[in-house]
Image (spheres, helix red, strand yellow):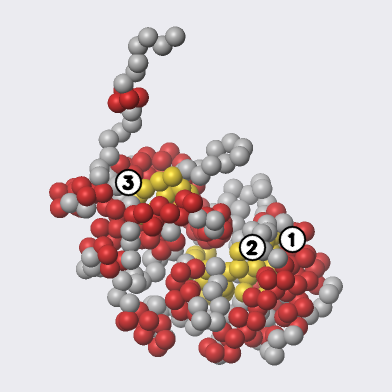
C-alpha cells in the first residue's frame, strides 16, 4: 500500500532544463547562440531545414568523427532549442533519436538570410509532425542514402565528394509538374587531375508500392527529359535483390515502350548488396546494374557510382550545377518565392585548428 506519494516535479529533477519556444526566439537567447554556434552547427540546422529529419546516426555520419562527439554536440543544440527531437516506436529494440529543426535554429537560419521566421515557411508543430507522418521511414531512408555517401567521403575515400543533394521538396518545386524524384544528387571523383561527375534522380523503394507503379514512374522522367533536353540517370534503390529482380521486370517493360529509351538511363541496386564488413558501406560501391531492354541483363556487370556513366556511352557529361538559379525556370521560381533558401552544401565546413583544440570536432 502506498502511504507517501511522490511529487511529480521530483520525477523530472534529473532532466536538463529547456527554453520555451518564445524564449528560444528572444533577443537574449539569440545573443547567447551567436557566441556558441559553430559553422558546423549552422550547417546541421540548414540540413534539417532542407531534408526535414535526420537520425542521430545520420548526423554523426555527416558531420562528426565519433559517436561521443556527436551526442555531446547534438545534446547542446537540443538544450538550446536549436533542434527538437523524438523517438519513434519500434516493435523490437529502440529506434535512434530523430531530430528536426527547432524554434531557435529556425530563427538563426532566418536571420542569416535577412528573413523573418515565417518567411522560411517554418512552424515548429509542422516540423514535429513528421514524427507521425506515414512517410517517415521513406524520408529517413532517402536521407540515409545520401548521408552514407557523405560519411564515405569524410572517412575513407579521398578524392570523392558529394557535390549536390536536393530534397524531394526542392525537386518538386523544380520538376513537380512532370515528376517528383525522391532526391537529386551529384557525385564527383578526382584522380590524378581528372575529374568525373555523375548526377542522378533517386527513386527510393521501401517495398510498399506495387512494382507496376514503380515502373510507371519512368514515363514522368521521359517527359522531363523531353522538356529539358537533358538525359539524367534514374537510380532505383530497393531493399532486397529479390525485390530488385521483380522491379527490373516492371521497369524493363515500361522502359522499352518509351519513345526514346536512351533519354532515360536507369540503374538499380539493392541494400542487401552492400558489404556488411565495410567500415562505411554506401551506394558508391559496385552494386549498380544498368537497365537494358534485354531480359538477360540481371547477371551484371555491376558498376560503382563513379563508373556508372560508362554504362551509357551516349550520355552527355553533366553541366556545372552552379546555383539553384542556373536555369531560367528555376530562377523564376526562386524569385517568386523569397523564402526558398539555397540548398546547403552536402559536406560540412572544414574544422579550424582552434575548434579542434576546444574539442568541437
Residue at the spot 55% in from the left edge and 38% down from the top edge: 94
| Label whose residue precedes the other's in the sequence (2 or 1) | 2
As measured in the structure, the alpha-carbon distance from the residue carrying label 3 to the one carrying label 2 is 32 Å
Crowd tier of the residue under label 2, counting other residues whose Cα lies within 10 Å: few below 14, some 14–19, many 20 or above: many
**SS for callout 2:** loop
Residue at which label 3 appears: 77
Would residue 140 be seen by someone viewing this image from the given angle? no
Residue 6 is left or right of residue 241, and the answer is left
Query: Which residue is denoted by mark 2 in the rendering?
Result: 205
Question: Going by the image, does 48 lie left or right of 182?
Answer: left
1 or 3: tag closer to the N-terminus: 3
In this view, the residue in front, 297 or 251, is 251
Mark 2–mark 1 Cα distance, whole angstroms, equals 9 Å
How many angstroms separate mark 1 from mark 3 (CA)?
Answer: 40 Å
Q: Is residue 304 left or right of residue 247?
A: left
Q: Which residue does the image show at 58% across and 90% down from the upper left?
A: 226
Amino acid at each position: 500500500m502506498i502511504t507517501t506519494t511522490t511529487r511529480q516535479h521530483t520525477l523530472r529533477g534529473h532532466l536538463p532544463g529547456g527554453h520555451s519556444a518564445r524564449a528560444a526566439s528572444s533577443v537574449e537567447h539569440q545573443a547567447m547562440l551567436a557566441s556558441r554556434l559553430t559553422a558546423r552547427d549552422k550547417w546541421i540546422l540548414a540540413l534539417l531545414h532542407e531534408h526535414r529529419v535526420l537520425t542521430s546516426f545520420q548526423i554523426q555520419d555527416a558531420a562528426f568523427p565519433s559517436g561521443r562527439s556527436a551526442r555531446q554536440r547534438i545534446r547542446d543544440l537540443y538544450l538550446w532549442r536549436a533542434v527538437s527531437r523524438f523517438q519513434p516506436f519500434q516493435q523490437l529494440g529502440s529506434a535512434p533519436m530523430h531530430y528536426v529543426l527547432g524554434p531557435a535554429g529556425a530563427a538563426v537560419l532566418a536571420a542569416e538570410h535577412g528573413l523573418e521566421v515565417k518567411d522560411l515557411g517554418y512552424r515548429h508543430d509542422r516540423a514535429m509532425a513528421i514524427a507521425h507522418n506515414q512517410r517517415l521511414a521513406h524520408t529517413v531512408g532517402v536521407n540515409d542514402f545520401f548521408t552514407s555517401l557523405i560519411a564515405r567521403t569524410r572517412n575513407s575515400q579521398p578524392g570523392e565528394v558529394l557535390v549536390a543533394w536536393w530534397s524531394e521538396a526542392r525537386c518538386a518545386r523544380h520538376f513537380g509538374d512532370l515528376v517528383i524524384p525522391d532526391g537529386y544528387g551529384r557525385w564527383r571523383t578526382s584522380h590524378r587531375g581528372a575529374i568525373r561527375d555523375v548526377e542522378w534522380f533517386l527513386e527510393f523503394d521501401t517495398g510498399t508500392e506495387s512494382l507496376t507503379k514503380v515502373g510507371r514512374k519512368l514515363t514522368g522522367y521521359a517527359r522531363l527529359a523531353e522538356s529539358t533536353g537533358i538525359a539524367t540517370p534514374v537510380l532505383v534503390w530497393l531493399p532486397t535483390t529479390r525485390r530488385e529482380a521483380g522491379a527490373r521486370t516492371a521497369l524493363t517493360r515500361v522502359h522499352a515502350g518509351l519513345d526514346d529509351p536512351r533519354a532515360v538511363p536507369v540503374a538499380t541496386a539493392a541494400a542487401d548488396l552492400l558489404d556488411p564488413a565495410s567500415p562505411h558501406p554506401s551506394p558508391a560501391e559496385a552494386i549498380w546494374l544498368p537497365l537494358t531492354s534485354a531480359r538477360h541483363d540481371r547477371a551484371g556487370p555491376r558498376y560503382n557510382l563513379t563508373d556508372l556513366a560508362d554504362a551509357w556511352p551516349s550520355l552527355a557529361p553533366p553541366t556545372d550545377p552552379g546555383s539553384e538559379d542556373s536555369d531560367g525556370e528555376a530562377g523564376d521560381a526562386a524569385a517568386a518565392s523569397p523564402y526558398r533558401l539555397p540548398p546547403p552544401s552536402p559536406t560540412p565546413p572544414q574544422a579550424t585548428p582552434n575548434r579542434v583544440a576546444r574539442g568541437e570536432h
